[in-house]
Image: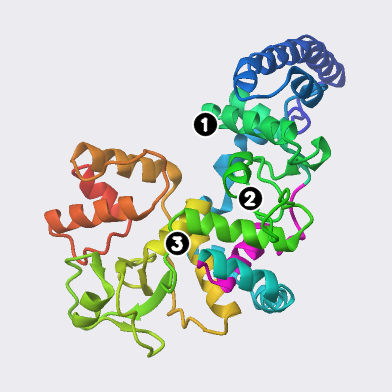
Amino acid sequence: MTQKDSPTLAPDRRMALAGLAAALFAIVAPARAAEFAEFIEGLWPAAEAAGVSRATFDSAVAGLAPEPGVVAKPKTQAEFTISIPAYLAGTVTNSRVARGRSVAAELAGPLRRATARHGAPGEIIVAILGVESNFGSATGGADALRVLATLAWKGHRAETFKQEFVDALIMLEKGYATRGQLRGSWAGAMGQPQFMPSAYLKFAESDEGDGVPDIWRSHADAVASIANFLAKSGWVAGLPALVEVTLPDGFDYAAFDLDFPRWRSLGVARADGGALPGAGAASLYLPAGAGGPAFLISDNFEVIRQYNTSDAYAMSVAVLAERIAGRDIPLAPWPHVAPLSTAEVKAMQQALTGKGYYQGPLDGKLGRTSRNAIHAFQLAAGMQPADGFATKEVLRRLNGR
């Protein structure tokens, strides 16, 4: 119950407490500001070592202050806090599919050139553009330097954001962007592709092949940059990222990682009646467990996850791309399954690590490594079906209960 809600707190008492709070803020705020300013100055040696001039540094950080509330943002990311079907329903809408097809037609030239250079299909590029920034219309208005500095100061991945802050300064030093252009999401992702500064330095590309890539105003440069990201992240041309499949009766779930021909020999078939690819590695993916839809995902699915490490994100991009291209994925009905909390997933990863099944970060995020570890544990424990799906029952069994 708040002070405002309390019927027993007298008005003069409330006024006294309000005055005390104001006095404390007057003391604490300058102290925090001084601490933040000292932290920013401490980033100068790294910036200098990266080739940033003192003039660029001083101009960029002038008046910089912490961004309120940004440190808590990673804990509320939709990609990791809601179920995959709910995320899909909100991301792959009929209106977004229609807009994606219109954008694909408008950008046919840049998409054709990007695909020719990098092998990534136009529909995947357009789908990423759609999910990241609503096709370039929602790029974010936060001061990127301010949020990067705040996350470097107090965030849970401080070292990563320190480097991103320095990379943003490099962009200014080299004239790749103006101070005013460094605006984006709460995490510092910028422009139509929502590139972090490090991603801009590695992957930003001009559609014309020369000049400074303008990922803020140029749709063509955004397309070229996304395609370059996909290619340099390992995109395999001609291989679908995701295929919905049906499993044969009596499927034993003994294997998760085979190739497409081997899956076909086991009786796995495309849900839409088409043919499975003739070659390429593929992993069985059951995002709602054995009772939900089944998919085969290729290495290209993992390439999409390098853009955003969420399975929900990668699925949304892959499904949206298929629908933009006019290839409808049937999507079998999803059972209602309450997702585990981040804390529960971390506990599961820790237990799997302790039993020798998992070697990865204890980050509370489910991906292929976690699924394979769960699958291996289920097989060893005699749990059926061994579908690699994270449930409270798996967690209970891991903890010997």
Visible residue check, residue 335: no
Left or right of 23 on screen, residue 311: left
Which comes sooner in the sequence, label 1 or label 3?
A: 1
Amino acid, disc 1: Arg
**What is the C-alpha distance between the residues marked 1 and 3?**
27 Å
Placement of 79 over or under 128, stated as above or below: above
Is the residue marked by circle 2 packed among few (<14), some (14-19), or many (20+) residues within 10 Å?
Answer: many
Mark 1 vs mark 2, foreground winner is: 2
Whether residues under marks 1 and 3 lie with C-beta atoms below 8 angstroms apart, the answer is no
Q: Quadrant of residue 42?
A: top right
Is 364 one of the magenta-colored residues? no
Whether label 2 touches label 3, CB < 8 Å? no
Residue 204 is labelled as 2
Q: Residue 155 appears at what percent x and percent y?
A: 57, 29
Tell me if I can see residue 205 in this picture. yes
First in residue order: circle 2 vs circle 3: 2
296 and 29: which is toward the camera: 296
Seen at 87% across and 16% down, the residue is 12
Tell me the number on the disc at residue 235. 3
**Disc 2, SS:** loop
Residue linked to disc 1: 157
Estimate the x, y position of residue 340 in percent, counting from the top left. 41, 51
Q: Which residues are magenta?
A: 119-140
Q: Residue at (84%, 14%) from the top-left corner?
A: 19
Q: Nearer the viewer, residue 186 or 84?
A: 186
Q: How many neighbours does mark 3 have within 10 angstroms: few (below 14), some (14-19), or many (20 or more)?
A: many
Residue appearing at x 59%, y 39% in the figure: 198
